[in-house]
């Protein structure tokens, strides 16, 4: 966690990383996401902390469905990205997926 909190623009201090989501297959076909901040500071809370750190255990047969917990977490992270940007940065959204 300390490494993701250190990723920012050196000149301005602007935080460029919104979230790190670790994805792994679930062993019991029950999808779940663990948020490493308390409820009010999670991505769905009243005061989300950036960068967020989540671990999602996925049932890969249902992860793409809109009712999926993983789907709602990805949508929320993308909302946080766009809300953090000013008008000039709207075209610069960069999504990095590393496997």
Image (cartoon, rainbow, N blue to C red):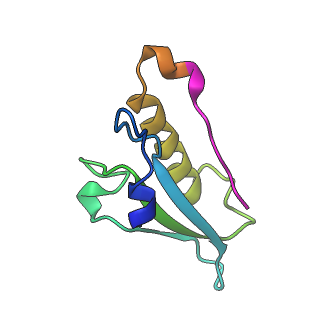
Which residue is rendered at x = 47% and y = 36% of the image? 81
Is residue 96 located in the magenta-colored stretch of the structure?
yes
The answer to whether residue 73 is magenta is no
Residue 4's image quarter? bottom left
**Is 58 above or below relative to 83?**
below
Q: Residue 82: horizontal and vertical position, in percent?
A: 47, 30
Residue at 41% in and 40% down: 10
Q: How many marks?
A: 0
88 over 18 or under it: above or below: above
Q: Position of residue 96 (x, y in %)?
A: 65, 46
Residue 75 point in image, percent of width and height: 53, 43
Q: Is residue 50 left or right of residue 66?
A: left
Q: Above or below — where is 16 with respect to 64?
A: above
Residue plotted at (69% across, 62% down): 62
Pick whichever, 65 or 16, lies toward us: 16
Q: Quadrant of the N terminus?
A: bottom left
Residue 32 location (% of width, % of height): 52, 71
Q: Residue at x 44, y 62 (%)?
A: 3
Comparing 12 with 72, the one in front is: 12
In screen coordinates, is 46 left or right of 54? left
Instruction: Assign the C terminus to one quadrant of the image.
Output: bottom right
Q: Which residues are magenta?
A: 91-99
The answer to which of 90 and 12 lies nearer the viewer is: 12
């Amino acid at each position: 966690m300390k490494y993701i909190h250190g990723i920012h623009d050196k000149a301005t201090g602007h935080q460029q990383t919104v979230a790190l989501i670790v994805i792994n297959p679930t062993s019991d076909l029950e999808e779940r996401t663990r948020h490493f901040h308390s409820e009010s500071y999670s991505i769905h809370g009243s005061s989300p902390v950036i960068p967020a750190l989540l671990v999602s255990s996925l049932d890969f047969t249902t992860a793409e469905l809109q009712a999926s917990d993983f789907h709602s977490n990805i949508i929320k992270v993308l909302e946080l990205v766009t809300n953090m940007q000013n008008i000039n940065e709207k075209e610069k959204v960069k999504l990095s997926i590393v496997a």
